[in-house]
Amino acid sequence: MKISDTKELEKIAKKVRRNIIEAVYSGKSGHPGGSLSCADILTVLYFNQMHVNPEEPKSVARDRFILSKGHASPALYGVLAERGYFSREDIITFRGLESKLQGHPDMNKVPGVDVSTGSLGQGLSMANGMALSSKLNKDGLRIYCLVGDGEIEEGQIWEAAMTSSHYKLDNLCLIIDNNNLQIDGTITEVKGLVSIEEKFKSFGFETIKMDGHNIPEIIEAFEQAKKIKGKPTAIIANTVKGKGVSFMENKAGWHGKAPNEEEYNLAIEELK
């Protein structure tokens, strides 16, 4: 399945956002802000870019996706449900005691989850291993890894970035969800992280900037990344934390808080 129609992809992204709100509200906990900010990116990956098949979730011939910022699992679950990996009805079991949809993705329980994540900073290292394996096997797979802009304060990210460049992993595409907020405030307030693009360039990455909510621009960025040879690509996606729900947008307080009933109803109404 490959959907190229912008309007159709936008409709799917809105459904993914509704799934995010449903999940976090039902679980009474979770991380809506950073899940909503990457919903459009994940929609394009799973419905336009990646070679995957929900009927064969463990196929060795599939592209891989690593959600390094594993706390944004509602976004991943939301898109996997829309793609047909499991029933949408499972969304409301999020974080339930017996649910497979736990707060962080579990590859042993959830069809379509390629890597169990949650400890921040580790995803790029795992993506490197997958990308290197694919190059050695000459199987032509592409590996996508999504990290948060707060997450890249972790030192392991930069050790992994050196590895990506050293092995010329041009089948690796790193996406930075640059929503400028983390749990304690703005990125600059917490760590003073600036010039993300220049940093990745200095580590040997080809860099691409895009509006992480503009579907055609997201598609173009991924298509451009496929043409890069001899080095990995870092896509800096400028996004809005809480995108799609007006009272959550650009609010650090919605990093890890579930809506109450009134807020839930308002959010669902906006996403109709």
Image (cartoon, rainbow, N blue to C red):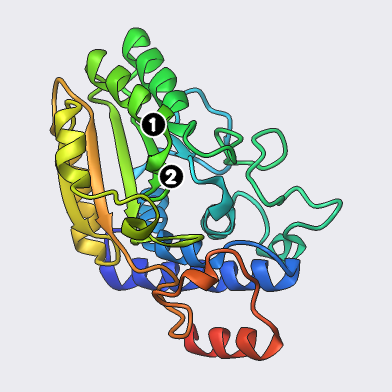
**Drawn side of residue 251 relative to residue 179, left or right:** right
Pinpoint residue 48: horizontal percent, then vertical percent.
33, 51
Q: Given the image, on which type of amino acid does mark 2 rest?
A: Glu
Label 1 SS: helix
Residue found farthest to the right: 98
Report the number of discs. Answer: 2
Quadrant of the image occupied by residue 118 = top right
Label 2 SS: helix
Residue 60 visible in the displayed image:
yes
**Drawn side of residue 83 relative to residue 48, left or right:** right
Q: Which mark is residue 183?
A: none
**Drawn side of residue 272 relative to residue 128, left or right:** right
| Residue at (53% x, 71% y) in the render | 254
Quadrant of the image occupied by residue 105 = top right
Q: Are marks 2 and 1 in contact (CB under 8 Å)?
A: yes
Pinpoint residue 200: horizontal percent, then vertical percent.
21, 35
| Residue at (47% x, 25% y) in the render | 126
Compared with 268, 183 (above or below) is: above
Write down the residue under mark 2: 151
Q: Given the image, on which type of amino acid does mark 1 rest?
A: Ile
Compared with 256, 69 (above or below) is: above
Write down the residue under mark 1: 157
N-terminal label among 2 and 1: 2
| Residue at (18% x, 24% y) in the render | 231
| Residue at (51% x, 57% y) in the render | 79
Residue 63 visible in the displayed image:
no
Pinpoint residue 30: horizontal percent, then vertical percent.
64, 62
